[in-house]
Amino acid sequence: MDGTPVQQTQSADGTVIAFDTAGAGPPLILVGGALSDRLAAVPLADLLAPSFAVYTYDRRGRGSSGDTPPYAVEREIEDLAAVIAAAGGSAGVYGHSSGAVLGLEAVMAGIPITRLAAYEPPYILEGDRPVPPADLAARIGDLVSSGRPGGAVKAFMAEAVGMAAEMVDGMAASPGWSSMEALAPTLPYDIAIVGVGNTMPAERLTAIRIPTLALDGGASPDWARHSVAALAATIPGARHLSLEGQTHGADIKVLAPVLEDFFS
């Protein structure tokens, strides 16, 4: 990033949303997924900064942003709209995982997004994999409120992401675990954005009329790649691209040139 202090804008409900900027050019907003804040997007923003004015922001409840209850997906859409307004009134958007779903929802809500790239929004096609339990968000909230954020993260990873127990235990032993625990209170927000059952809202998606790029990793699980292909087939004129050898966390040196080409 360019070293400027964190900036702030105000969402429609008065919540302060913190953001950083890097570079100059057409505005491009990066929207992170679960367990990430604006700082997680800095390396990708730095690669894109020579071509764009890149905005990274803390979704509500994260980092330096505020959080005004009660939560609703509509409030997160308004938060993104506030960042876009700060960027000049319209912008391209790149969203990852639940951030990709948030970007899609914002487009369908009429937010002035000019182009959208969506990396592996976690929709689940029927029969591809078990859907997360309907009570998962409530149980995660209970774990957080009872002082067990680590348990909340583990439940999310196992039941929402579908990660094997040994992989979850490995993450819990990693240096970044404390950062994930700090973001655990926002996990119910990500679950709400994706929706019960992670069902793709196909009928509403057909109303999207902006250039859309649906991205997946060629080494990601079949269910993720199937859903991204279905997303691209549902949105009129959307393009589908698989990044060879990549997974849900794509190498930014592979991802950045693809985004630069799409948003230029």
Image (cartoon, rainbow, N blue to C red):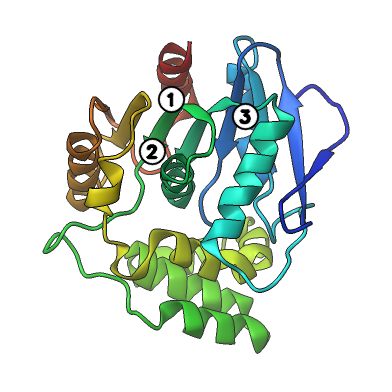
Q: Earlier in the sequence, mark 2 or mark 1?
A: 2
Q: Earlier in the sequence, mark 3 or mark 1?
A: 3
Q: What is the crowding at mark 2: few (fewer than 14 residues within 10 Å), some, or many (at least 20)?
A: many
Separation (CA) of disc 2 from disc 1: 10 Å
Q: Nearer the viewer, residue 10 or 121?
A: 10
Question: Residue 43 bears which disc, if any?
Answer: 3
Residue 38 visible in the current orientation: yes
Q: Kindly identify which residue carries mark 2.
A: 119
Secondary structure of the residue carrying tag 3 is helix
Q: Inspect the image, locate mark 2, and give the three-letter code of the amino acid beneath it.
A: Tyr
Q: What is the crowding at mark 3: few (fewer than 14 residues within 10 Å), some, or many (at least 20)?
A: few
Image location (x, y in percent) of residue 213: 34, 28
Q: Inspect the image, locate mark 1, and give the three-letter code of the amino acid beneath it.
A: Leu
Q: Is residue 117 above or below residue 46?
A: below
Residue at (29, 54) in percent of width and height: 123
Q: Kindly identify which residue carries mark 1.
A: 255
Residue at (20, 39) in percent of width and height: 234
Image location (x, y in percent) of residue 152: 54, 76
Secondary structure of the residue carrying tag 1 is helix
Q: Nearer the viewer, residue 207 or 60?
A: 207
